[in-house]
Amino acid sequence: MDYQFKEIEQKWQKFWAEHQTFKAETDSAKPKFYVLDMFPYPSGAGLHVGHPLGYIASDIFSRYKRLKGFNVLHPMGYDSFGLPAEQYAIQTGQHPALTTETNINTYRKQLDGIGFSFDWSREVRTSDPEYYKWTQWIFMQLFNSWYNLETDRAEDITTLIEKFNAAGSADVKAVCDEDVKSFMPSDWATMTSEEKQEELLKYRLTYLKESTVNWCAALGTVLANDEVKDGFSERGGHPVEQKKMMQWSMRISAYAERLLQGLNTIDWPEPVKEMQRNWIGKSIGASVRFAIEPSEEITGLSQDFIEVFTTRVDTIFGVSYLVLAPEHELVAQLTTAAQQNDINNYIAQTKKKSELDRMADIKTVSGAFTGSYVVNPVSGERIQLWIADYVLAGYGTGAVMGVPSGDQRDWLFARHFNLPVVQILDAQKDIEHEADPTKEGKYINSGFINGMGYDEATATLNSWLEEKEVGKAKINYRMRDAIFGRQRYWGEPIPVYFKDGLPYLVKEEELPLMLPEIDKYLPTETGEPPLGRAEDWKYEDEYEYELSTMPGWAGSSWYWYRYMDAKNDSDFVSKDAIEYWKDVDLYIGGSEHATGHLLYSRFWNKFLKDLGYVQEEEPFKKLINQGMIQGRSNFVYRVIDEEGRGTNKLVSYGLRKEYKTSALHVDVNIVDNEILDIAKFKLFRPEFADAEFILENGKYICGVEVEKMSKSYYNVVNPDMLIESYGADTLRMYEMFLGPLEQSKPWNTNGIEGVFKFLRKFWRLFHNENWTFHVSDSVPAKAELKALHKIIKKVQDDVERFSFNTSVSSFMIAVNELTDLKCKNRQVLEDLVVVLSPYAPHICEELWVLLGHDAGTLSYTPYPTFNPAHLVEDEFSYPVSVNGKTRLNLSMSLTLDVKQIEETVLANEDVQKYLEGKTPKKVIVVKGRIVNIVL
RNA sequence: GCUCAGAUGGUGGAACUGGUAGACACGCAGGACUUAAAAUCCUGUGACCUUAAAAGUCGUGCGGGUUCGAUUCCCGCUCUGAGUACCA
């Protein structure tokens, strides 16, 4: 029987499921290896051909590691809370849990069809109460913790209370809100329990606070910074506005430095590390206080100085004005009567501009003078105080010093409003025409730093400012705390209730706090989140629960630990499991999670480490980003008439220029090598059933464009269809063959035949003309062993460096060679089956059993050992040249090892004679054949 | 603007630390088998110039450089993709 992929694949998928072949035991006898995929959100559309790319790569790696003797953990689950199921619920009234369940079943069926070696006994679903119980538990740990800067780690809130009892707020160094009170131990003792709670909330790692949030009206919820792209929501593309709201936040800023430093210890793609570095946005500089010049007009100031942050404190003598963000709280107090109109107009104008307008409009210089003055602390100079929308309220202190000679934006501002431009470094050039941000040269016009260089000036100024208590060296991070609440239904309930307006945790033994049933998935009439609709949903029948739910990233920020011990109902993961599995050795997923999931996961991991629940500081040792598979859309060209109306004529791609045409998407599944199947097209678009087709060379050729893979472009290729016609093994190998794993590329099914032919050839290698299985036990021939060991070495090297595409080619070469040699040797073919099995597991299992082994043993058989001795070349003619010119032709027997060729060649008598005693600089071997001696 | 990645035949791509550029596959052309088609198998396939055969010249986005030798390293540019941005 020729290669019957359907039977073979069904048979083995069933076998693996029934025998739980890939169940990983927490067994310390073998070394562990943890291979993780980013678990999918089960969307209604099912998997397209791009989704499994990373899963196939991780599956090949997992299977390879098992053959190499590792105890491999390779689990899968679902990130099953999310917006689409809820949007669907709003439209149809169907409970999101039902939609999710249906979608998961589709996903599971599709995943099983590809033959993955997942350990399904460890499956997790973030929307399962048994799972979100522990997500809530972690939330509670965060609530019960504060970040102690002295020990540089999170600690239980009780250690903070002890400090308050002992010495009040004085020697507490914590990451906390800005408005914390200073108090003595005696003050603390006399506070009411409510007052204490209120104060502690400012220290907790998850806290409730009035803050500016990204509000998306269309989705009816707030969004985290990483969920907003260019002023629109990442999901759905709805406009997002800034709004002040009471919100749960996570104090991720406490971990900014550790998140930054940790990047140096992990093997991740450089672009992802770079994105995280930018996101954290560390800048080293100084904060400086400019005293507000007293004036009769401005009274009742809440503070008598304005604090700015600068990364160039050395330029402080060049400051010619100060700018506040229009939203800055001091603006109202500092505006003089004369300037009141200007300022009011400017603020009104700023408010009207959306986030997008502001970005589009960066070239226009705008601002308004407040009428007030401040004093430069180093020079005592009196300078004007302005407001301008280029200063952001949310970054630094919301105030900036303007140094026109050193900063182009400041230069433009100064020129526009006629403010002085002062040169401060002798190396600054041409500051009449543009700013020069150089750090070279010596300072001039700069008081006590005149004549110094950059490093000295910075150090001098920092200590001067600190001594005079008007500033100090400071590190600023761009990263903000992460907003944690969502005004949505389909998420983890936050395990908190309110008593006298203050939040309290529910008791641990009351977890999970179940998501209540509601009648409609919309906000209440009073504008509360959907959970406000739940009837009789009160803590102890009395207190209001928190009505917002957790964001999408909550459940995915710790799930890799749950896989280690997925069924545990007394711990989020047992100590034993964590001690054995420790961390993820290889994590494969898309780079779109760089500043979201991957950052939050590192944050929670560090937190759990601080509390001693996990072992490692970093959760994912190695990360690989698989490229995105784009769609490849096909087009037909409809001729349009004079009035621009579509006619009933369709013209082939090459001839379309001769007509006025409009392009129409055509289903890629009825196009083969850009040739349209006209009969199928008429079924696809019945309105063209009697259309005229203008052909070239008797064919209708379609146009091509690369777009996102989407239903609306008719370019979705479904893996199920390919499995139906070619089988899962072909699909797996073809997805790898398509190109380098990390590269984005458009999907093109054209080459799949080649891979299919290869597998059929491979199958035939084991069979005689009558399709009966046939191998012989003779001693393998030299050439056969050579072909085999070449592929063993190649595939081993390829898998270790994630170059799966090239090994597919090598398999093709090996099978062609063995076919030509008419190889039927058991030993050789058996090793070949083992080496190929991670890529094409079904066919290999089948052949493994035909070779006389027990079913299910292939996955744990040892990987064949590579023996370089088998790569010895027979007597071969070697041209030996000197400095590139051919002189000698030697006949020698050599291995393919470069070192050995060098030694053998130099030892050769003829070569020795030729060299006349001189020592060559270098011996160069080209492809093991050509030898060049450089004298 | 800044940061990062990339540019190789008709196409996807290979060439691992500088060493015969274009592996492997698709496509295309020709052939075998067939009444025919499909399937299968075989041969050819970077460009140019030639030939009976051979050989030769050019060739990895562009311009330079280092080297016996550069797709690979260095300098300068062009283009494409991704991320990011009044971040002080």
Image (cartoon, rainbow, N blue to C red):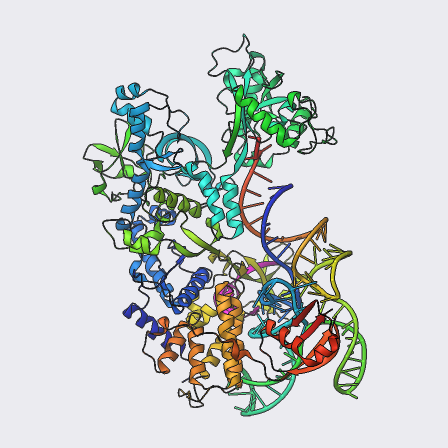
Q: Which residues are magenta?
A: A662-688
* Residue A40 appears anywhere in the view: no
Tell me where residue A368 sits by quadrant: top right
The residue lying furthest to the front in this view is: A917
Q: Residue at x 58, y 75 (%)?
A: A896
> Which quarter of the figure is the N terminus of chain A placed in?
bottom left
Say above or below: A533 vs A837: above
| Left or right of residue A826: residue A870 | right
Q: Residue at x 49, y 58 (%)?
A: A626
| Left or right of residue A725: residue A451 | right
- Front residue of A19/A548: it is A19
The residue lying furthest to the top in this view is: A296
Position in image of residue A34 (x %, y %): 38, 58
* Residue A596 appears anywhere in the view: yes
> Which quarter of the figure is the C terminus of chain A placed in?
bottom right
Position in image of residue A28 (x %, y %): 31, 61
Taking the magenta stretch, the answer to whether it contains residue A679 is yes
Say above or below: A22 vs B30: above
The residue lying furthest to the left in this view is: A541
Taking the magenta stretch, the answer to whether it contains residue A8 is no
